[in-house]
Image: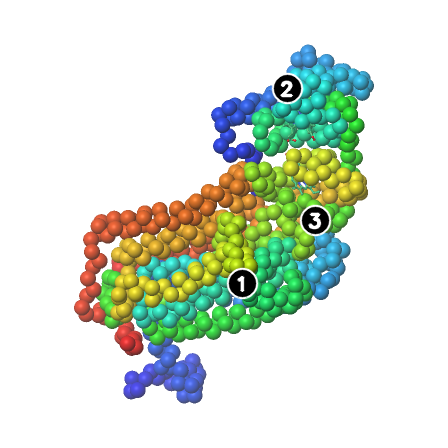
């Protein structure tokens, strides 16, 4: 390449850069990356919030591993939390108490880690919503959609594993529920359960296993897939909204260096600051009050973290039905605990193909839809979100009952009705709003024929 | 911390009137105790003279405030159970937590500010106690209690209904185990021994008096626990945390990214 960028020979920085470039040839790749164009729309940064939360998770998580002891071995607690002194607890719970009361900055790290996990999942969900409602999953980005869905599944799994590690009453209750859901899987259930627990629930194996899953297997899988996710993103180049000269063949926005990098760095620091603020100001998961896990105890108001809350809700709303096929029984938890999430993720994964099948649109797209211009998709998305928000709320029927002084039974029936009716109503309203907005601002503005100056070359799109 | 007064759903107009009446009563009673009202003065001066006088005063109060539901001599009616043999502990608990006199005869009786003065309660308790043998008011010595033992007993026996942090929990059909965050020591012990409403009775065979002291000590501890880590979000668990991450966290990041991608006015 004749136009290869040569760093200035004279300065020390230039010489160092040159030394690396001669050996690694980084200048060209670096320049391509630094010149990459990012569209300047806020919604493109939602995925980055997830990324930055993940960075905070890694940083705080590493600190926690220095002190956490992933073992179910019984020990006598003798730390500084008086109400538990002398109680027989697991080494895992013991080390969490130490982290909370006796390790410098331990509680802060725990709390920031937990808030970061909640934000990580929240940001992923918001990011998926953005991609869904703007049609960014359409050809050629179907593979990245699948990668993204897998990242969501891994993040959910890792959140649950982390929540379950502490061996307090709440996490033990969560594992017990997970076990009963696993046991309800026809044929394979008992096998999977005893494989996972290394025997009957709870046993002593589950904590060390969850630990490896939580700190090694899933994080490595997440990092690897994140690499793929971002690699594909760079290869495809960004999508963008109409306007400012955006076409199907260019990307309109700002170069990574210096503008976009500064913005992204700012978002990183703001995210980290927010998480530290939450971790410093709002107590999260006070395990010392819940006490060590005792299989025969249970506390009222036991809930999972929000991202698992919809599953808890579906278990609670499911009427007590079972299915018997001949003399074989499919137990109740199978339907809300296995079938529902199964169907959920199947539909989520398959969505790009489902939509293309119905719209018969198999063309590549780089210009995004405004949600209002796709009323059917938008309505379906809003209905789905409504359904899961209701399930999430239903995961806390007991808390709602006590907080608002209403009967649990009444709340359950209300939510059952809402779960069926509200999504339909929400879809109709969403569709109406889309059509109304369309009417108000007329048809979408046509794409310009020529690319504007601030444009990048299109990616070679395999056809 | 939210410690709302819990009421049944869809409180009818009539019930509201009843509740207001009770509240009015509650507000009016202390004033009456201080006023030079002749009846109040008699009960105050008469109270210390002896157990029999106490019982007599108690019977008078009972015949005006309780007889409509609990019947002549406390034998019970369709609107209230018999009080023969419930013991002083039950009466003291019901009156000091304001549960009696009951406002509406359906559903669970919520705890309220007590409707009677201290002397009046003593008199009523003595009267109910005189109806038949039953559990006496427990002697509580929190200092003799063992916090650690209390914690283990609480998590094993009480957390299932009241929650590990004693914030209260729902039972079926509109019943609830109330928050224990503002109950006095003796009433905690009485509740354990008496088992009000849906709550099971834990008598001396279940918990010794020492264990009871420990339990009370732990409930008292939960009312104001060593609570590092910032605002406690009502201690209702991960649900509240979920709402915080969406309402505070997610909104904050959206504000950040909207701000950082904002276009300058000059375009």
Identify the subunit bearing mark 3: B
Work out whether A390 lies above or below A43. above
Residue at 59% in and 26% down: B105
In whole angstroms, how far apart are the C-alphas of marks 2 and 3? 39 Å
SS label for mark 2:
helix
Give left or right: position of A336 versus B72.
Answer: left
**Residue B115 in view:** no
Name the quadrant of the N terminus of chain A: bottom left
**Quadrant position of residue B259:** bottom left
Residue for badge 1: A186
Location of mark 2 (residue): B68
Q: A52 above or below B16?
A: below
Instruction: Determine contact: label 2, label 3, CB under 8 Å.
Output: no
Distance Cα–Cα, label 2 vs label 1: 59 Å
- Say left or right for B199 vs A366: right
- The residue beneath circle 3 is B156
Quadrant holding the C terminus of chain A: bottom left
Q: Which chain does tag 2 point to?
A: B
Please report the residue visible at 73 percent of the width from the left and 29 percent of the height from the top.
B86
Query: Which element carries disc 1, helix, strand or loop?
Result: loop
Image coordinates for residue A114, horizontal then vertical, percent: 55, 59
Residue situated in front as seen by the camera: A210 or A203: A203
Q: Position of residue A283 (x, y in %)?
A: 58, 52
């Amino acid at each position: 390449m004749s136009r290869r960028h040569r760093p200035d020979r004279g300065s020390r920085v230039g010489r160092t850069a040159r030394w690396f470039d001669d050996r690694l040839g980084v200048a060209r790749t670096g320049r391509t990356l630094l010149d990459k164009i990012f569209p300047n729309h806020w919604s493109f940064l939602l995925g980055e919030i997830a990324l930055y939360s993940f960075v905070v998770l890694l940083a705080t998580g590493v600190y926690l591993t220095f002190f956490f002891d992933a073992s179910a071995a019984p020990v006598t607690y003798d730390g500084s939390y008086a109400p538990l002194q002398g109680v027989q607890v697991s080494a895992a719970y013991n080390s969490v108490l130490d982290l909370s009361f006796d390790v410098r900055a331990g509680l802060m790290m725990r709390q920031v880690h937990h808030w970061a996990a909640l934000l990580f999942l929240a940001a992923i969900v918001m990011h998926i919503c953005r991609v869904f409602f703007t049609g960014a999953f359409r050809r050629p980005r179907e593979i990245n959609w699948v990668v993204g869905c897998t990242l969501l599944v891994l993040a959910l799994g890792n959140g649950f594993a982390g929540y379950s590690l502490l061996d307090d009453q709440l996490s033990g209750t969560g594992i017990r529920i997970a076990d009963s859901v696993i046991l309800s899987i026809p044929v394979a259930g008992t096998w999977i359960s005893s494989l996972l627990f290394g025997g009957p629930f709870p046993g002593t194996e589950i904590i060390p296993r969850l630990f490896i899953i939580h700190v090694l297997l899933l994080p490595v899988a997440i990092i690897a897939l994140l690499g793929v996710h971002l690699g594909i993103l760079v290869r495809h180049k960004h999508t963008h909204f109409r306007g400012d000269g955006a076409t199907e063949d260019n990307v309109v926005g700002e170069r990574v260096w210096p503008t976009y990098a500064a913005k992204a760095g700012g978002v990183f620091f703001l995210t980290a600051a927010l998480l530290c603020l939450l971790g410093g100001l709002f107590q999260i998961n006070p395990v010392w009050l819940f006490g060590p896990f005792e299989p025969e105890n249970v506390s009222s108001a036991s809930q999972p973290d929000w991202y698992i809350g919809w599953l808890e809700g579906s278990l609670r709303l499911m009427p007590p039905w079972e299915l018997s096929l001949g003399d074989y029984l499919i137990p109740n938890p199978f339907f809300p605990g296995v079938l529902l999430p199964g169907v959920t993720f199947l539909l989520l994964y398959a969505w790009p193909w489902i939509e293309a099948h119905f719209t018969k649109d198999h063309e590549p797209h780089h210009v995004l839809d405004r949600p209002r211009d796709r009323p059917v998709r938008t309505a379906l998305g809003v209905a789905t979100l409504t359904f899961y928000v209701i399930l999430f709320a239903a995961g806390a029927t007991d808390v709602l009952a006590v907080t608002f002084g209403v009967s649990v039974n009444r709340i359950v029936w209300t939510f059952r009705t809402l779960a069926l009716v509200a999504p339909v109503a929400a879809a109709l309203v969403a569709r109406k709003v889309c059509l109304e907005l369309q009417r108000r601002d007329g048809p979408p503005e046509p794409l310009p024929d020529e690319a504007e100056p601030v444009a990048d070359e299109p990616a070679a799109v395999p056809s | 911390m939210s410690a709302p007064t819990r009421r049944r759903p869809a409180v009818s107009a009539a019930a509201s009137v009843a509740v207001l009446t009770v509240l009015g009563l509650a507000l009016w009673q202390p004033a009456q105790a201080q006023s030079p009202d002749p009846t109040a003065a008699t009960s105050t001066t008469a109270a210390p003279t002896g157990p029999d006088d106490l019982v007599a005063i108690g019977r008078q109060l009972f015949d005006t405030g309780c007889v409509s539901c609990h019947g002549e001599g406390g034998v019970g009616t369709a609107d209230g159970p018999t009080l023969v043999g419930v013991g002083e502990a039950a009466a003291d608990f019901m009156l000091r937590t304001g549960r009696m006199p009951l406002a509406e005869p359906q559903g669970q009786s919520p705890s309220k500010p007590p409707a009677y003065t201290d002397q009046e309660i003593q008199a009523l308790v003595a009267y109910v106690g005189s109806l038949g043998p039953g559990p006496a008011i427990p002697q509580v010595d929190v200092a003799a209690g063992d916090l650690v033992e209390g914690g283990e007993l609480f998590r094993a026996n009480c957390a299932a209904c009241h929650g590990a942090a004693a914030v209260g929990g729902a039972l079926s059909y509109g019943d609830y185990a109330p928050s224990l965050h503002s109950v006095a020591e003796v009433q905690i012990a009485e509740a354990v021994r008496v088992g009000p409403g849906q709550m099971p009775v834990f008598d001396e065979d279940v918990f010794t008096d020492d264990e009871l002291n420990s339990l009370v000590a732990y409930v008292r501890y939960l009312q104001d626990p060593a609570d590092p880590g910032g605002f406690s979000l009502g201690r209702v668990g991960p649900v509240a945390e979920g709402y915080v991450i969406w309402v505070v966290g997610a909104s904050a990041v959206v504000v950040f990214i909207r701000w950082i991608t904002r276009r300058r006015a000059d375009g």
